[in-house]
Image (spheres, rainbow, N blue to C red):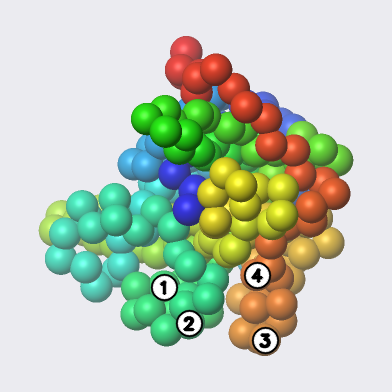
Amino acid sequence: MCGRYKLTTAAVDLEAYFEAIVSNAGTIEPMLNVTPGMVMPVVAIGRDKVPVITSFRWGLVPGWSKDPKTGYKMINARSETITQKPSFATPFKRSRCIIPSNGFYEWKTEGKLKIPHFVRRTDDDIMAFAGIYDRWKYPDGKDLFTYSIITTAANDRIRHVHERMPVVLNKPDFATWLNPGTDLQALQILLHPFENNHTSVEVIDSVPQNP
């Protein structure tokens, strides 16, 4: 799974990297330890049919859900069953996004200890997670946009720490992933473990706290 990640890249750099328009740059702040329930930047196709960087809450709340608290149970969507789960199947078809990060945290159990590790790319500062999102409405009509990070089997570098990892997209895949017209077969080709040779797993003393 992916339950914590880091994002400290400035808004202007995210805009250039994803070739997207930042719609609310004022809400993008450095986060050393992103946790479920936080409102964080995502890249999605906006109303003008171009990529925008906006902010959604982490933890998917399906549009048909009766309680927004269900999002805390849906921070991840398994790639192997994403087309079979009602909560994820429709967003996978029509509401995909990219979650910018600089890497993610996992813990390895050794005896009574849980040792934190930080996983990042070695060939790039930004690690782009594949995601899905949905819109839920409060009784007063206000919208709540939420997202989930898609996970897959861990690659060989990560497997000794955890059996799962986020699906990581490379730049050439961004347009395919975000395009609402991409067929499911083309999307599922992208749902594979990230390359071993571009993955670094570092033991850290503790997960850093946010400012």
Instruction: Give the residue number, with chain letter if any, for mark 2.
Output: 83
Residue 180: x percent and y percent? Answer: 61, 76
Instruction: Give the residue number, with chain letter if any, for mark 4.
Output: 191
Residue 176: x percent and y percent? Answer: 73, 71
Q: Could you classify mark 2 by the number of other residues whose Cα lies within 10 Å: few (under 14), some (14-19), or many (20 or more)?
A: some
Instruction: Give the residue number, with chain letter if any, for mark 3.
Output: 185
Amino acid of disc 4? Leu
Instruction: Give the residue number, with chain letter if any, for mark 1.
Output: 88
Residue 198: x percent and y percent? Answer: 82, 46
Query: Which comes sooner in the sequence, label 3 or label 4?
Result: 3
As drawn, is 51 to the left or to the right of 82?
right
Q: Could you say which is closer to the camera, residue 49 or residue 1?
A: 1
The structure residue drawn at horizontal position 47% and vertical position 76%, both measured from the top left corner, is 82
Amino acid of disc 3? Gln
Whether residue 43 is situated above or below residue 203 in the rendered picture: below
Q: How many numbered markers are drawn?
A: 4
